[in-house]
């Protein structure tokens, strides 16, 4: 224990002492809808299914974004006859993975990071290789896997300046955690530099997995029904919004309705659970929640798409979209998803989560940066009034997105190397 940083010793002790309270904590979260009450045992490390025979790659992503980014990697592993276990920590990501995982890939909830729960999880699954997507790093889980001889990698590695500064205060602890990883595959050189400074031993720049993802899918029948219900109506789409952004989009809606009385505004919240809150913000505006069912009415002014996994549907319905998480300091969500579907993008100033992607798409468009409701309204009004210009901007966005790629192949090469080295150990 003498060589273990004090911070890690304190963390391990705290997780041991708090472990008896974890079941109560999970029950409370379950009542709030933040845990799947039928699968809480997985959060305690108990497996919900047997381990498949043969090699197993374990991929962990915190939530929806990380799991979706890993899909091309998951599909590549499965196609190479390698079993894949995906873990995540949220109810929505589990629901999403149920519909998106290919045959040969399994999903479990990640165990709470106590020594007993993580040891139980690792003893059952015995992964050959573990890939942590972005930077959702749990000390007991990581160090326990390392002690078992699991080959570890951070893939699609991302670290904001704020996280870097926070981690810098616990450099010994962070260095010990990062030293457990055999390789760190960073999205860009700036991120790679941060990981190197903090002690990651083998850092390589490979780009972002999101840049290699295929276009989002959608249900063709649902798309046809939606198109039929909105035919002839101008549409403003705000995708993946956060609190503080809906309050900006709704006044934009009011402004645009003065010129386009039949305007339909579609708001897709990043977290569907926020549907009721957005409905309350709508006040007297005629609104409808998709989660409550029913056909979209001609009298509906604001359509709240509080469902999961349907962004491909809405990006195909419009010629441009506002990307959420960019007016508030969340860092923005993947602009390549709409761009690949020839949907132009506008975004606020906070795009640090996918900076290279935003730079590529907005650079190709030559426009799209907005900072307030006035600028959003002006951008939207111009494109709603000129469909040809909107289409041309969508084509430019698609060209910008097409310039990025290659991260999946580089990541697969690294994973193959880790599997080979594990087999030789």
Image (cartoon, helix red, strand yellow):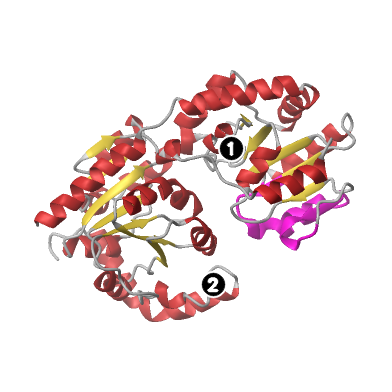
**Disc 2: which residue:** 29
Q: Nearer the viewer, residue 68 or 243?
A: 68
Q: Which residues are magenta?
A: 267-294
Q: Mark 2 or 1 closer to N-term?
A: 2
Using the image, determine if residue 142 lies above or below residue 38: above
Q: Residue at x 31, y 53 (%)?
A: 131
Where's residue 268, x and y in %?
67, 48
Q: Is residue 320 above or below residue 148?
A: above
Q: Which mark is residue 326?
A: 1
Q: Seen in the image, is 171 located left or right of residue 375?
A: left
- Say which quarter of the image contains residue 127: bottom left
Does 54 lie within the magenta span?
no
| Residue 194 at least partly seen | no
How dense is the environment of label 1, judged by Cα within 10 Å: few (below 14), some, or many (20 and up)?
A: many
- Lateral position of residue 268 relative to residue 387, left or right: left
**Residue 269 within the magenta-colored segment of the rendering:** yes
Q: In the rendering, at what x and y percent does residue 123 appear?
A: 24, 73
């Amino acid at each position: 224990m003498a060589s273990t940083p004090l911070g890690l010793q304190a963390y391990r002790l705290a997780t041991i002492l708090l472990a008896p309270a974890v079941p109560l904590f999970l029950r409370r979260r379950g009542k709030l809808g933040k845990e799947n009450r039928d699968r809480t045992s997985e959060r305690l490390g108990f497996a919900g299914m047997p381990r498949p025979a043969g090699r197993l790659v374990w991929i962990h992503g915190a939530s929806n974004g990380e799991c979706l980014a890993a899909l091309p990697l998951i599909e590549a592993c499965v196609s190479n006859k390698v079993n894949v276990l995906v873990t995540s920590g949220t109810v929505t990501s589990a629901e999403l993975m149920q519909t998106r995982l290919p045959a040969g890939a399994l999903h479990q909830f990640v165990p709470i990071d106590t020594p007993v729960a993580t040891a139980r999880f690792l003893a059952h699954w015995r992964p050959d290789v573990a890939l942590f997507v972005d930077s959702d790093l749990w000390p007991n889980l990581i160090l326990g896997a390392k002690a078992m001889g699991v080959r570890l990698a951070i893939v699609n590695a991302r670290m904001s300046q704020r996280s870097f500064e926070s981690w810098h205060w616990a450099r010994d602890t962070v260095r010990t955690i990062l030293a457990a990883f055999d390789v760190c595959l960073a999205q860009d050189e700036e991120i790679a530099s941060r990981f190197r400074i903090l002690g990651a031993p083998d850092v390589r720049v490979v780009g972002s997995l999101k840049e290699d993802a295929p276009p989002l899918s959608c249900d063709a029948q649902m798309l046809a029904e939606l198109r039929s219900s909105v035919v002839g109506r101008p549409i403003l789409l705000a995708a993946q919004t956060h609190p503080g952004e809906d309050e900006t989009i709704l006044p934009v809606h009011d402004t645009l309705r003065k010129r386009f009385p039949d305007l339909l505004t579609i708001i897709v919240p990043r977290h569907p659970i926020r549907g009721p809150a957005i409905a309350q913000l709508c006040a007297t505006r005629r609104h409808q929640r998709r989660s409550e069912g029913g056909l979209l009415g001609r009298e509906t002014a604001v359509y709240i798409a509080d469902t999961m996994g349907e962004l491909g549907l809405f990006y195909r319905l419009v010629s441009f979209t506002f990307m959420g998480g960019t007016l508030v300091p969340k860092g923005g969500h993947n602009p390549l998803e709409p761009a690949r579907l020839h949907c132009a993008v506008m975004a606020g100033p906070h795009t640090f989560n996918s900076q290279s992607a935003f730079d590529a798409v907005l650079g190709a468009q030559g426009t799209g940066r907005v900072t307030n409701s006035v600028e959003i309204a002006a951008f939207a009004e111009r494109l709603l009034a000129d469909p040809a210009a909107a289409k041309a901007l969508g084509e430019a966005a698609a060209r910008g997105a097409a310039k990025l790629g290659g991260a999946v192949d580089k990541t697969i090469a690294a994973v193959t190397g880790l599997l080979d080295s594990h087999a030789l150990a």
